[in-house]
Amino acid sequence: MKKRDHNIYLRDKQNLEARLERKQFEDQPETMFKESNVVYEIAERTRAIGHGGIGAIHKLVCRLGLDDAINRNISLLKCHVPYWESDHVLNIAYNVLTGGTCLEDIERLRNDETYMNALGAGRIPDPTTAGDFLRRFDETWIFALQETINETRKKVWQLQGEAFRKKAIIDVDGTIAATTGECKEGMDIAYNGIWGYAPLMVSLANTNEVLYLVNRSGNRPSNDGAAEWMDRAIELTAPVFKRVWLRGDTDFSLTHNFDRWDDRVGFVFGYDAKPNLIEMADGLREAAWKPLQRPARYEVKTEERRRPENIKEQVIKEREFKNIRLESEQVAEFDYRPTHCGKTYRMVVVRKNLTVEKGETRLFDDVRYFFYITNDREMSMEEVVFFANDRCNQENVIGQLKSGVNALRMPSDSLVSNWAYMVIAALAWNLKAWYGLVTQSQSGRRDIMRMEFKRFLISYIQLPCQIVNTGRRLVYRILTYSKHLETFFATFDYIKRLRFV
């Protein structure tokens, strides 16, 4: 950050802190929100956009060479009149990053001359042209696009320190992407009665990056074809990270692959509570079971607050609903060789002691088992369970892709074209992760990596900026104060210094 910008930032920060300083107010005679003599005018020369952070994202894309890589590796257009493949991909991704939720929202950017000036673009594709571009994809080109993005991703990973590259945790899960359309090729009815598609997502738990997205017909099971994409994720991460882990729920305990995965990676998967496993767990000596103490969700820095009344539990008791209450948990382990495996693996089992109630009446006690299979022999039993449970954070990533990024809206008319949109829209989510990884402030990096997509847009993208072409420079002049500006300027300075051979 320049000295002048730093001084302005400090001045604005002090003014805001003074304005928001906690005071003991007297009873005010008037409301804070007052009517003013508002007048609207159109600026004659000054032009501005409301999402000035897009310039930093575009600079990151160019410094990483993603735009050039897309043009080299993706050949969907016979001639470029006037758009290239990267223009289409970035147009859709930037639409998402500027708050767009569907292809039609591109029209607002296409009619914003200042936005196009901010990106150095003479014009951008309209929504109809963007839809036509998506329909040009086939499965081969979608895979090529994902591999192009992943090759660029490696550049960001290589910038990280030794601690970051110590291990990679690959999560895999499927979901249901509903659609109200009736004529979309490839749609089908899922197990829960929802019409749509059944995407598979492979992500990196360290950064919440989406490594692979695969669109599938809505009636496909979660694990269908998953092993192939998990293998590709291993090939992607193994050259960069010292240790690679696979993690998934019971649907992804693909025992046919365990022996070959055991030679390359560590894995922890949930495992179905089959009768033979329950019998083996019941046969364990009581001394083999240890209490499972789960860590607190967060650390109390001051003093613990009084727990509020549980309204939900009160309603359940009053209406005499069936209520299952957890009394205690124990953990144990034993060796187990699945039918399709030639090796023996470690099976960790959690025994949950439950009480089933109805209203104030205690009906009976119940015991349920949860199994986790792993090839790791170093972690304690408790660590294996907590490691497996951490996979639940991937549900948050899927939720962000659905409701934050809107990557699973399925705007096109076929399975493959919707798959292409899914991958390009998810690029916006990955750009958020990459931006966080190049942030030099540790606290800023941690915050950005954990941010919901909407909050990231509000904090780092939706910056009102005046756009000025002066000399050989394109100036984004920020027009308001934000507490994130110091991190924003430091990150942008670092992005400008990036050079790759």
Image (tube, rainbow, N blue to C red):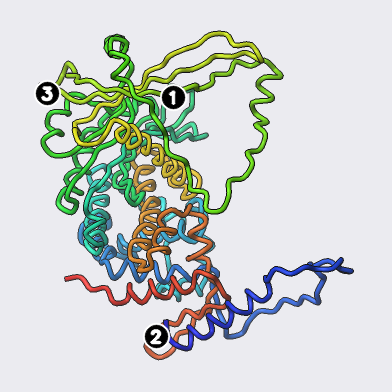
Dot 1 and dot 3 residues touching (CB under 8 Å): no
Residue at horizontal 32 percent and vertical 10 percent from the top: 282
Mark 2: which secondary structure?
Answer: strand
Of badges 3 and 2, the one in the foreground is: 3
Which residue type does callout 1 highlight? Answer: Ile
| Image quadrant in which the C terminus is located | bottom left
Q: Position of residue 9 (x, y in %)?
A: 53, 80
Identify the residue position indicated by label 1 in the image: 189
Q: Is residue 274 above or below residue 343?
A: above
The answer to whether any part of residue 409 appears in the image is no
| For marks 1 and 3 on the same chain, the one whose residue lies earlier in the sequence | 1
Residue at horizontal 46 percent and vertical 46 percent from the top: 400
Which residue type does callout 3 highlight? Answer: Lys
Res. 280 image quadrant = top left
In the image, 47: left or right of 79? Answer: right
Q: Position of residue 326 (x, y in %)?
A: 50, 22
Which residue occupies the extreme bottom position in the image? 471
| For marks 2 and 1 on the same chain, the one whose residue lies earlier in the sequence | 1
- How far is disc 1 from disc 3 in space, using C-alphas? 38 Å
Q: Is residue 335 above or below residue 497?
A: above
Mark 3: which secondary structure?
Answer: loop
In this view, the residue in front, 129 or 390, is 390
Identify the residue position indicated by label 3 in the image: 343
Identify the residue position indicated by label 2 in the image: 473
In the image, 267: left or right of 370? Answer: left
In this view, the residue in front, 48 or 447, is 447
- How far is disc 3 from disc 2 in space, using C-alphas? 63 Å
| Image quadrant in which the N terminus is located | bottom left
In this view, the residue in front, 489 or 344, is 344
Local crowd size for mark 2, using a 10 Å CA cut-off: few (<14), some (14–19), many (≥20): few
Local crowd size for mark 1, using a 10 Å CA cut-off: few (<14), some (14–19), many (≥20): some
Q: Position of residue 234 (x, y in %)?
A: 19, 43
